[in-house]
Image (spheres, rainbow, N blue to C red):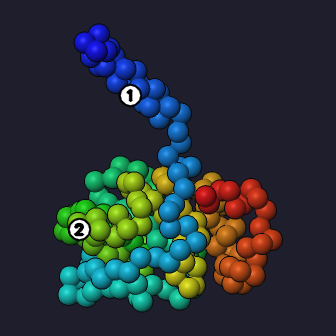
């Protein structure tokens, strides 16, 4: 028994090393969302630009839209932001979730880099992000007209991600209800959002 105690730390070390080694080969962009094909969680949060105005799930657009989690402390969000502006100029509705940020810094950011969001809510304690299953910023969700999450992207949304992953589903959702085409989607298109 005393010899077993001597090997116990070694056994724990080997088990942890195997876990960490396995983690090196995981792609965070391939992590499935627990909320895929489920409704956006209920929320009641103040707007970043106006702390007197509280936004709720019912204020989300009544058509397909993007829900983008961002923050001023997020370097990748700075990289992504110009492309979000371009999408907004093309008429893609985007709602922002400002994650654990300072309101004044967020307002300055939007003034300086332009505001692609129809509105952005201040998720100061990270509750909505937690309910969405967010691992960090940026993360973007494609939401249908009924408020159901149909796709999740972890990382920067750029031209390639938009054109190959999000836009095909967004365009289909604009033209018809999810149920009308979900069975006809190619496996490759579906697998990109899981």
> Residue 180 is drawn in which quadrant?
bottom right
Give me the C-alpha separation between circle 1 and circle 2.
34 Å
Q: How crowded is mark 1: few (under 14 residues within 10 Å), some or many (20 or more)?
A: few
Left-right relation of 177 to 149 = right
- Name the residue rendered at 45%, 59% in the picture: 139
**Number of disc labels:** 2
The residue nearer to you, when weighing 90 against 146, is 146
Q: Vertically, is 120 above or below 151? A: below
Q: Where is residue 133 in the image (x, y as percent from the top left)?
A: 42, 61
Q: Vertically, is 152 above or below 14? A: below
Q: Where is residue 175 in the image (x, y as percent from the top left)?
A: 71, 83
Location of mark 2 (residue): 124
The residue nearer to you, when weighing 171 against 89, is 171
Location of mark 1 (residue): 16
- Name the residue rendered at 28%, 53% in the picture: 73
Camera sees residue 1: yes
């Amino acid at each position: 028994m005393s010899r077993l105690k001597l090997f116990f730390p070694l056994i724990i070390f080997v088990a942890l090393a195997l876990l960490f080694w396995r983690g090196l080969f995981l792609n965070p962009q391939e992590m499935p969302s627990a909320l895929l094909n489920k409704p956006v969680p209920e929320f009641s949060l103040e707007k970043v630009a106006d702390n007197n105005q509280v936004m709720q799930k019912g204020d989300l657009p009544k058509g397909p839209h993007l829900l983008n989690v961002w923050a001023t402390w997020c370097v990748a969000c700075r990289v992504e932001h110009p492309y979000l502006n371009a999408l907004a100029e093309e008429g893609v509705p985007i709602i922002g979730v400002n994650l654990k940020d300072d309101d004044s810094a967020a307002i300055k950011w939007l003034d300086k880099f332009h505001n692609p969001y129809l509105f952005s809510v201040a998720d100061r304690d990270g509750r909505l992000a937690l309910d969405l299953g967010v691992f960090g910023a940026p993360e973007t969700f494609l939401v249908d007209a009924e408020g159901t999450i149909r796709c999740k992207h972890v990382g920067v949304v750029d031209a390639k991600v938009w054109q190959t992953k999000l836009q095909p589903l967004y365009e289909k959702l604009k033209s018809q209800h999810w149920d009308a085409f979900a069975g006809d989607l190619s496996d490759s298109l579906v697998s990109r959002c899981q």
